[in-house]
Amino acid sequence: MKKYRFTMGTLFFLGTCFQSLHAQTAPTLQEILDSALTHDYSYENKQLSLKSIELDRERLNDVYMPRVELNAKEAYLFAAANLTTPEFAFTQLPIPLPLVIPEHENRYQIDNFMTQADLKATFVLFAGGKVGYLKKANEARLEAETALVNTDKNGIVQNVSAVYDQLSMLKAVKAMLDESQKRLDENTKTARKALENGLITQYEYNKVNLAQAQLKSKYKEYEGKRRLVLLNLNMLTKIPMERLEKIDEDLQVMTIAYVDAPQNRPELTALNAAVRANEYKVKAAKTWWIPKLGASASVSYLGLQNPRIRTTQPTLITQEKINYTFNNFNAAPIFTAGVGLKWDLFDGREGITETKKAQLDLQIAKNKLEDANEKIQLQLEKNKVELEVASEQLNVRQIALQIAENSMDQAMKEFKIGLIKSTQLLEAENDLQQAKLDFSQAVFQQRRAAVNYLEAAGILNSTTLK
């Protein structure tokens, strides 16, 4: 028993340590994307709509299942009828005078409580082939809707990856600010010595102090933007903030292999499936004239409780009024079984109209497919051009950054020996900061263009985003 307690305690301790370790690690991009897909309500609703289509498939499968119903009722029955017999004579009777029966009018009434129960089963034997075609159409529809869900998935991946890259870009901004702070601290010491030796004026020294204050303001701006990005990522993924704050990824250029044609675009998959679905719907509509077979079987019970028959006038035979109550009347079982045929020889052109409408829907689906093929190919070329432009802009920003870095190094050397003023040094510092921001923004835009190209090519996934 003690050994069992020790084992359970050890497992609990290890589980707690694992959860604690997991809570202290930064989430990977794959975890972030999976979590975003799990917590996106629109994406979840699209997946739930697929279950509705699956229910339609089950409904079609149940067409040939028997329908069993039980009907029972208890009712009071009252009926009345007037019967008038004409006057007639029996002339052939061997009596001296003809026997004449006068006209007679009487009213018959019957009342009782009635019980009726029916157990009935019906099922379809043959539906003219319509059910089979509708099943295939529903399967194609499910394929189309599943593909469209993947388009929503791609949209979520694009959005979340952009937010994730914003954190990497802000990391580059933080590194730029730290480098600027280090240089400004060094330049402030140089400016203080220059002020003490009368090499610069108080105005020029104050310019350096102003640059320090501006840099602190940029730190505050950086912290605010990073906080907003983390909140946005937390809203999208529901991952705790303490884990998101540990994300520390560098912003890197994405390397893309170009393709000649789109591959596995979900839009094309959906439209191809929609064309097939409409083809099956046309075939299903054309079955309107084919005979349908069905079968049914039933067991019934009929009971009358204390039925009473009355007349308002004496009858001709007994010369007395009828007022008779007889014992209960029961009829059971009343069993029926058989096969039925339904053949719509002319349905008021309803089947023909339905067929024409299905053919129109088919042509619309084909037109959408052709239009999508052309636009997707154009989108691929457009995104390729945008990626090439973004890559070229990145090269330009990289050259500008190198020039700004060289200018900053030269300015610091010249400032130390008094060849330039502090204002010129600060201009070089601002130019370098802007060059680094422009370069980081160019890397970010190159990644966005690359993600858009991957989506247009139909190969966007978490692996290709790295």
Image: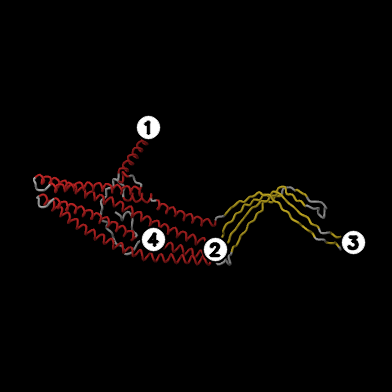
Q: Residues within 10 Å of mark 3 (few under 14, many from 20)?
A: few
Residue 97 shows which numbered tag?
3
For marks 3 and 4, the one nearer the N-term is 3
Say whether marks 4 and 2 touch (CB < 8 Å).
no
Which mark is in front, 4 or 1?
4
Q: Tell me the distance, in whole angstroms, between the alpha carbons under discs 2 and 1.
A: 72 Å
User: Mark 4 highlights which residue?
Assistant: 267
Expressed as whole percent of the image width and height from the top left, the position of residue 437 reads: 23, 53
Q: Position of residue 315 (x, y in %)?
A: 81, 54
Q: CA distance from mark 3 to mark 1?
A: 124 Å
Residue identified by numbered label 2: 128
Distance of mark 4 from mark 2, alpha carbons? 34 Å
Q: Separation of disc 3 and disc 4 at Cα?
A: 103 Å
**Residue type at numbered disc 4:** Glu
Residue 20 falls in which quadrant of the image? top left
Q: Could you tell me which secondary element the residue under label 4 belongs to?
A: helix
For mark 1, what is the residue? 2
Q: Secondary structure at mark 1?
A: helix
Name the element at disc 2: loop
Q: Nearer the viewer, mark 2 or mark 3?
A: 3
Q: Secondary structure at mark 3?
A: loop
Q: Of the residues under marks 3 and 1, which one precedes in the sequence?
A: 1
